[in-house]
Amino acid sequence: MKILVIYQRSGAGISVIYKRLICELAKNAEVDVLSDQEDIERYTGCGIRNLYTQPYTYNMKEWDRKFIKRAGRFLVSEWWAHKVSKVIANDYDVVLSCLTSTQLLPCAGGAYIANKLKCKYAIYAVDAIPGPGGWTPPKIYKWRMKAVRKYFPKADYVASSNKHMLDFQLSTFEHKAGLISNVLLTPSPNETYEYPISKENIFLYTGTLYGLRNPRYIISAFKRILATYPDAQLLFVGKVLELGDAEGILTAEERKRISILPHTDDLGALFSRAKVLVDIDADLEKDPFLSSKIVTYLKVNRMIVCETGHDTPSREMFAGLKTIIQCDHNADSLYNGMKRALEMANEQQDYSERESLIKEFSAEYVGAKLWKDLLKVCGKQE
C-alpha cells in the first residue's frame, strides 16, 4: 500500500508526534511525506520513500484566512496542493492529513490531492477543531468551523486523540457514507525515566501555560504547601503567560520558591529532581483535551497531580490509579492532592499500575491501530 502523509510543521513541536506514527506506518507500507518545511535527516532510518516540501508563508496563511471567511474555502492551500500535485507520485491508495486546531493547510491540501488522485482521504486531528468551550475566540471559531464543514465531509476516515474529542469532532460535519472513525491516542516517546526517590520537595510542570489553563489555583495551593514544607519549590518549564497572579497571592519571600525555566527537550535532569509532576487542564468542565505532557509523565516514576474538570479525558483514563491524584479546579482540592502526593512520593510506589496505559500510548500500539484502520479504509488485507 502507498500512503502520502501531509502535515504542517511551521516550527511546531507537534510534528514529532506525526513522525512517530509515520515511522510505524513505514514498517508496513510505502510512505511519502509532504510538509511546508522539513529536514530529511529527521527521518534517517525511518524507511519513508520520499520527502516533499512546499513552503507555506505567513502571507499565504493570512490570505487563506480571508478566503475562508468570505468564500468558505482555503483557496491558497488548495493552490499550494495543486503545485505539489504536479511533482508527487500519483499512485497513492490513501492521503493522510495530520491536523492541529491552528494548522489547517493539510486539511484543504489533503482533500484537494485525494480528490485529484481519486484515492481515499484520511484525517488525524490531534486537537478538537475548532477548540470548543472558550478555547477559540468566537470569530475564529466561526471560520475554522467553515473549514471543518468544507473539508471533513470529504474524508473516508477521521481519527482524534481521545474519545471525548472524537465525539465532538464527529458532531461538527456531515459524514460521508461509510465513514470510518477511531481514537488514536497521542503516541509517546520511547524513553522511560527511572530515578531514585528525590530528596527535594519539587513540583514540576512542563509545557506552556496558555488559554484556559489557569495557574491561579495551584499557586494558591502552593502557598499553603509552603506553610508545612518551607523548602518546597514549584518549577515551570516553558512559556508561562499568566503568572502575574502570583504577585497578588504570594509574599516576596514565597515568590522566590517559584521558578520559570526556559523550554528544553531534555527533561531528564528535571524529572530526576522533581518529587511530584503537575498537569493542568483547562479551567472548564467537559473539556475534550488531554494534555500532551501527561503522555510523557506516565513513563516517569514520579507521583502525578492532575488538575482537571469533570467529565474529561483525564478523569476517565486515570480513574482508579493511585499514583495519579486528580484534583478539581480549586485551591483546596489541589492543596490536599499536592500534600498527599508529597507524602506518597517519599516512599516507593507501584508505578507498574500504569503499564497498560503506557502500552496504549506507545507509538507501536497506536501505529498498528492506524495501519489496520487504513487497510480497512482501502479495502485491503494485511
Image (cartoon, grey):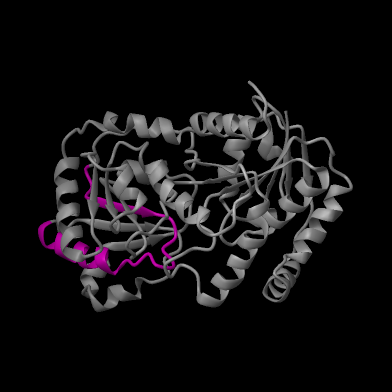
Magenta-colored span: 199-228
Q: Is residue 127 visible?
A: no
Q: Position of residue 249 (x, y in %)?
A: 23, 75
Q: Name the outermost residue toward the right.
A: 86
32 in relation to 174, above or below: above
327 in relation to 22, above or below: below
Q: For the N terminus, which image quadrant?
A: top right
110 in relation to 365, above or below: below
Q: Could you tell me which residue is drawn at 14 percent across and 64 percent down?
A: 224
Q: Is residue 125 left or right of residue 47?
A: left
204 in relation to 380, above or below: below
Name the foreground residue: 305 vs 34: 34
Q: Is residue 85 visible?
A: yes
Q: Could you tell me which residue is drawn at 78 percent across and 59 percent down?
A: 78
Q: Is residue 379 left or right of residue 139?
A: right
Q: Position of residue 35 (x, y in %)?
A: 72, 49
Q: Name the outermost residue toward the top.
A: 382
Check residue 364 for magenta coloring.
no
Name the foreground residue: 302 vs 199: 302
